Image: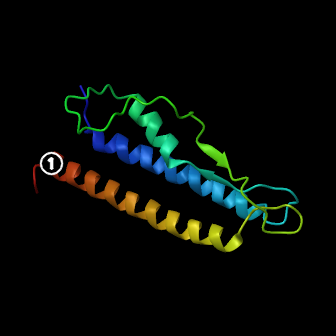
Amino acid sequence: MNLFSNTFSTLENALNYSSTRQKVITNNIANVDTPNYKAQDVSFKNVLQDSIDSIKTIRTDPRHFDLSDDSTDSNVTITQNNGSYNNNGNSVDIDNEMSNLASNQIFYESLIELEKGKLSSLLNVVKGGQ
């Protein structure tokens, strides 16, 4: 018996993604002056693909998306080898990282608010609507 709906597990996965992304961004910021350090990011596509792989899907109409593509790897953290912003070979753009940090914080806080709302609704049901 599943006490909670799939919403809780979806929110938990989203919080895990946001937490992983926060760690990667702060690691990039910490290594802004490290020679030859290449910035990393978290691939949402790979996280999503891992979640989709655990779901059995059947395509019943040609207009439906084909979710059976196995072409992606399961690596969540990717290294960005597309350039160097400093003379020492470092590819961390501090302005971009700070922007990513702020947007990830907003995303995380909104997930927490959604989780609080779900738990509040559950508490209301347990109390009998009082």
Hey, which residue is sitting farthest front in the picture? 62
Q: Position of residue 58 (x, y in %)?
A: 26, 26
Vertical position of residue 3 compared to residue 11: above or below: above
Q: Quadrant of residue 130?
A: bottom left
| Residue at mark 1 | 125
In this picture, is 65 found above or below 70? below
Depth check: 103 or 5 in front?
A: 103
Q: Residue at x 33, y 34 (%)?
A: 66
Q: Residue at x 29, y 27 (%)?
A: 57
Image quadrant of residue 99?
bottom right
Q: Position of residue 14 (x, y in %)?
A: 43, 49
Q: Residue at x 48, y 28 (%)?
A: 70
Residue 24 found in image quarter: bottom right
Few, some or many residues within 10 Å of mark 1 (<14, 14–19, 20+) = few
Residue at the outermost bottom position: 95
Does dot 1 land on a helix, a strand or a loop? helix
